Amino acid sequence: MTAVTFDVRDLAPVDRAEALRAAVGPSVLWVDVDHHAADRTIAARGTIRRVGRLTQFSVRTTPMTIRRTPRHTRDGSETRLILAVQRSGTATVVQNDRQAVVHAGDMVLVDSSQPFTAVNKDGTHHHYFCVPRARLALPDRMLGEITATRLGPDNPVAALAATHMSRLARSRALAESPGAHAVDRAAVELVRAMIATQLGAADRAREPLENTLALRIMEHVRRRIDDPALSAAGIAGEFGISVRHLYGVLARAGIELGEWIRTRRLEACRADLSDPRGSRLTIASVARGHGFTDVSHFGRLFKDAYGMPPGEWRARSLPADGPRD
C-alpha cells in the first residue's frame, strides 16, 4: 500500500466530515464520527501507510467523538487490536464496560470486534497501529482484560513501546525498507510484552521480552547516547546479562555496538556544527555534549567519517559571518 496523505481543510466545509470517514474506513477502521465543531472549522490531516503487515495511521484533528457500533463490528473485516499512541491532548476511551482517560505519552488498546467510543474534547494528535489479533497469539481472556486500559510510563515496557512506536510512525525509511517485515515483527513482540507485563502474566511475558531484548537495549542506548559514561558493561548490568550475552544479542540483530554509538554521536555533532543556533558553541563543547571526552580523538573520527575536520565543516556550513575556531 502506498502511503495515503489527506487534509480535509482542502475541501469545502460541507464535505469535510464524510471525507475523513471515507479516508479512514477502508484502510483503518469503519467508525461513525461526530465532530464537535461546525463544518467550517473541522480540520483533520493525516497519513495512512503499511509498515510490513501492520497498518499505521497518524492524524491530527479538531475535537470529535468516534464510535464503532455493533453494526460496524459485523463488517467482515479482520479482527484487529488498535493501539493508539496519544501524542497530545486528552482522550476518553470506553470499551467492555471500562473507561480509560489517556494523556500525552499514554497509550490505549481497543478491539475492533467489540463496540467502543473515544472522545477527544480538545482536538488530538494520535498514532494508531492496527495489529491483527491472531498475530499476538494471546488468549481472548487477556485481550479482553487489556482494552480501554491506560498504558502509561509507570509500566516500563509500555513507556518503551510508546517511544518505539512513535519513532516508527515518524520514520518513512523504516516503513518502506525491504526489512519492514522484521520491523513489524519486533513491534508486535513489543505489544505482546506490554500486554503481558501490564496484566502481570510473567509466563506470557517471558518469550516476547526475550524476543525484544535487542530492541530494548537499543532504546536504552538511544536515551543515554550523549552520556560519556555509557559502556557495554553498564548496559549489560542494566538488563541483568553478561557483556558477552549483550554482544551476542546485538550481533544477531546485525548491530555492532561501538560503531553504532560512534556513528550516532558523530551525526549529532555534525548537525550541531551546521546549525547557526549553536554557532557560539566551541567545537569542544559540541563534542563533549554528545559524549566525546577526547576532543582530539573526536576530530580524527570526524575527519575519517566526513572527509574534513570539524572546524572546516562548520566554516562551510555556517554563514560567512559565523564563528571560526
Image (cartoon, rainbow, N blue to C red):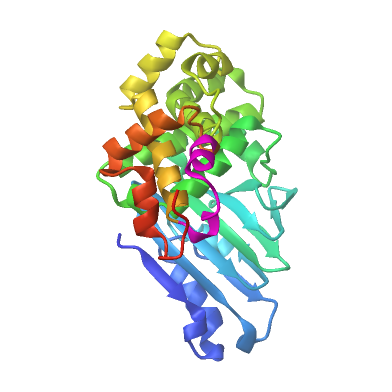
The percent coordinates of residue 204 (x first, y second) are 55, 22
The vertical placement of 23 against 169, above or below, is below
The percent coordinates of residue 284 (x first, y second) are 50, 38
Image position of 324 (left or right of 140):
left
Q: Which residues are magenta?
A: 275-288
Residue 267 seen in render: yes
Image position of 34 (left or right of 267):
right
> Would you say residue 279 sits in the magenta stretch?
yes
**So how many labels did they put on this image?**
0
- Which residue is at a point 66% across and 37% down the rendered structure image? 145
The percent coordinates of residue 52 (x first, y second) are 33, 46
The percent coordinates of residue 113 (x first, y second) are 54, 51
Quadrant in the picture for residue 196? top right
- Which residue is at a point 50% across and 11% down the rendered structure image? 241
- Which residue is at a point 55% across and 64% down the rendered structure image? 71
Overall secondary structure of the magenta stretch?
helix
Image position of 119 (left or right of 243):
right
Q: Quadrant of the N terminus?
A: bottom left
The vertical placement of 191 against 53, above or below, is above
> Would you say residue 230 sits in the magenta stretch?
no
Residue 79 seen in render: no
Quadrant in the picture for residue 2? bottom left
The vertical placement of 145 against 319, above or below, is above
